[in-house]
Image: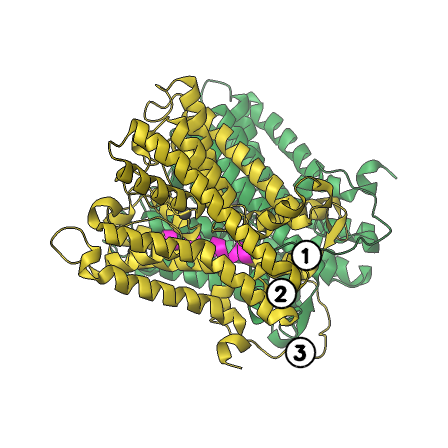
Chain colours: A green, B yellow
Amino acid sequence: MPPAVAHPVRLLPLVFLALILVGTLLLLLPFARAGETNPTFMDALFTATSAVTVTGLTTVDTGSYWSPIGHVIILILVEIGGIGIIALATVLGLFIGGRLGLRTQMLAQVDMHVVSLGEVRPLFRRVTVTLLGFQAVTAIFLTVRYRIAYFDSLPEALWNGVFDAVMAFNNAGFSLNSDSLGRYAGDEAVLLPVSVAVFIGAVGFPVLAELYRGWRRPSRWTIHTRLTVWGSLLLFAIGALAFLAIEWANPATLQDMPLVDKIVTAIEGGVMPRSGGLQSFDWNLVEAETQAIAVVMMFIGGGSASTAGGIKVTTFLLLAFVILAELRGDPEVQIGRRSVSGRTVRTAISIALLAVMLVYGGTMLLMLWSDASHIDALFEVTSAFGTTGLSTGLTPELDTASQLVLIGLMFIGRVGTIAAASAFVLRRRQPRYHLPEEQPIIG
Amino acid sequence: MPPAVAHPVRLLPLVFLALILVGTLLLLLPFARAGETNPTFMDALFTATSAVTVTGLTTVDTGSYWSPIGHVIILILVEIGGIGIIALATVLGLFIGGRLGLRTQMLAQVDMHVVSLGEVRPLFRRVTVTLLGFQAVTAIFLTVRYRIAYFDSLPEALWNGVFDAVMAFNNAGFSLNSDSLGRYAGDEAVLLPVSVAVFIGAVGFPVLAELYRGWRRPSRWTIHTRLTVWGSLLLFAIGALAFLAIEWANPATLQDMPLVDKIVTAIEGGVMPRSGGLQSFDWNLVEAETQAIAVVMMFIGGGSASTAGGIKVTTFLLLAFVILAELRGDPEVQIGRRSVSGRTVRTAISIALLAVMLVYGGTMLLMLWSDASHIDALFEVTSAFGTTGLSTGLTPELDTASQLVLIGLMFIGRVGTIAAASAFVLRRRQPRYHLPEEQPIIG
Ligand SMILES: [K+]
Ligand SMILES: [K+]
């Protein structure tokens, strides 16, 4: 058995590395670049990483820097790195089957909720078709609206509609316009379809599959689906309401808008930080409190095995239940009528703590290597780790070292903290005996 | 049995509340105030809370706002709230004995490492005498230096020496001077004794007791002592070296100092954020990176059952071992030749996550209610939660609501996140059956 299959935990990072490498080489080809000069290596590497990890942070203006061929390359990288990888993980999960440990199961997370080989293949095909169908519907909506209100030619409207629909569903924040969705600010016929597409994309494959089979019976949903669905709705509602309240009187965002536009923009403000990354307003001009809330949302991210990054909704909510159990003095962590093993809890903590370390470490490096303020550095770093793609405009101003930090964070954010970190830690032999317990004083 | 003893988890918060109340009333007495006007209620409440929780944040200038009687009241509140509470916790631990659960043991943490009643009382007396002895020695050192170099009268030098020695040992950041230790900047004959006293005070009673009995045999130390001692030294070394490196060329701090002064100031920079709170330089003028590192150090804090706040060194290091075990794929979390129970791990996570929520929530409130920047709000809030007392000067400028946030954080930081939060959560009956396990997807 080749090493990569014997150690499947190493496979996913390798797949992503290979995709980034191929993407970089493709973008370095002269015809990928618009204008006279060749693309620089750093711009190609950054763009390829951002596309494959479905982030959307950019060092250059996507629309004007890359040629139409470059845009097609980015679109394909996004589709492979987003929905494509989830398909691979599913197949991988089936291939390795029951031999996966908890760690490696995380790579192919979807296999934990599907029972037999026979059940999965048609299911996978149906969900993939459904996802592509959703993308097509969104693309049609956007194309019609773009043709009516923004573009004179149908091909141009169509290309923008397809591009934005793919970006929305894959939660990739790339846009052909230099101001992202800025020209569509307050236009509910654009912002609502895009927000819905981003929200569905961020829910994740396992949950969509389960909803597809049994959305009528919430009482039978697995814990994972319940946590993801209710958690996603809750985080969206908190984000949108906080955005509305804080930005209400901000002249740079909501103040001068009619009420409907205010609400639509607040919906965007609630959806996008949870990994979408498209923006109809300037995140550099929102209140600092809104930025701080967005940092939390980007850090949490979307659902597991989705196109979103971050520590994931389930990880976040599980930790909330852990705290609740501790405060109540419960012997077990319970969610619904189910208990959660200590091992699962340990994995959740490790993910959250590694994420905090990475984000705060990255923030300090950006502060050291640039003139960025604390909140600006934190915002951009969290956006990279959460593969969100929202930006206050800092990324293009950074030096190479700082951009490499963001590249590393996008990669880790997409591959998963544990999978990425495991690659650097040798697996020790499992000890065959238990050591005596001792209880250090905590807190 | 009275309710407070039947539910000892509620006792410690009540004791602290009572102390703060008494302190506030004492400071409201006209003769506690220097000058003509009476002290305001908020200033008295804030100062009393800051003193009882051995923090050192102040809304007013301690030296000029309070009379000598006011200073004596603050000194006594600090001694009771610092070393005094640790004595109470010990007695409490003995009184309730083996009936404590993990949650309540945290209140009287010291009882976990002492075996019998007969062993503890003389030990406690000896350690208390030793601590007071340490304070006396520090006071003598400082008095001599103050008399030689700074004050013309011996009583003045003595009073300043005693005050600063008590503050240092209790990790309380109050100073009779408006610039804290500013006038002693670079004076190793002041900064070194103060730093040593702060470091020892932050180690904590259980560790000091164990070191007293067996400091020659590190191999026999409990895990708790090993984690605390090596962790404290490691965090100090990291803090001091980072301070030296980042501030080396900062004209507001190290640049113009001779080498010895640079080193002494870096030692202070490594010690004080771990809960001391005295400062010979202006934390508003250090580099933003140094502030960010100090935030991490203040958040971690000192040893358990010490005069320090924060999540504590053991909690922090235990979580590091949890991550290591997860990455290695170990079934148990192991430290040294001992394993740590899942329940202990759960407590550690809960503390760390509650702390993150409190600190980030407090930061957002301060940002909402004042013009403070993100880093300034984060710095002051973490200083309150860590009962550290370092300040960039923000506290006096805050409105009443924000100052109440800081008061709440100082209280929670000193009482302990879990103890404070438990007071708000009803203890459910322990379920007598186990629920079936289910494994949500994590990460
Ligand atoms: K994104
Ligand atoms: K302090």
Pointers 1 and 3 within a single chain: no
Residue mark closest to the camera, 2 vs 3: 2
Task: Give the chain of mark 1.
Answer: A
The N terminus of chain A, quarter of image: top right
Along the line of sight, which residue is nearer the eye, A433 or B106?
B106
Horizontal and vertical percent position of residue A156: 44, 41
Q: Name the residue under label 2.
A: B102
Task: Give the chain of mark 3.
Answer: B
The magenta span reads B351-363
Q: Which residue is drawn at 66% across and 78% down?
A: B431
CA gap, disc 1 to disc 2?
Answer: 10 Å
Residue B123 visible to an observer of this rendering: yes
Q: Type of residue at label 1?
A: Gln
Say whether mark 1 is within 8 Å of ligand 2: no
Horizontal and vertical percent position of residue A125: 70, 56
Q: Are marks 1 and 2 in contact (CB under 8 Å)?
A: yes
CA gap, disc 2 to disc 3?
Answer: 17 Å
Q: Name the residue under label 1.
A: A439
Horizontal and vertical percent position of residue B393: 28, 42
Residue A412 as seen in the image, left or right of residue B397 = right
Mark drawn on residue B431: 3
Q: Residue at the far bottom: name it.
A: B1
Residue A250 visible to an observer of this rendering: no
Mark drawn on residue B176: none
Q: Is residue A215 magenta?
A: no
Task: Give the chain of mark 2.
Answer: B
Question: Which badge, 2 or 3, is on the more N-terminal residue?
Answer: 2
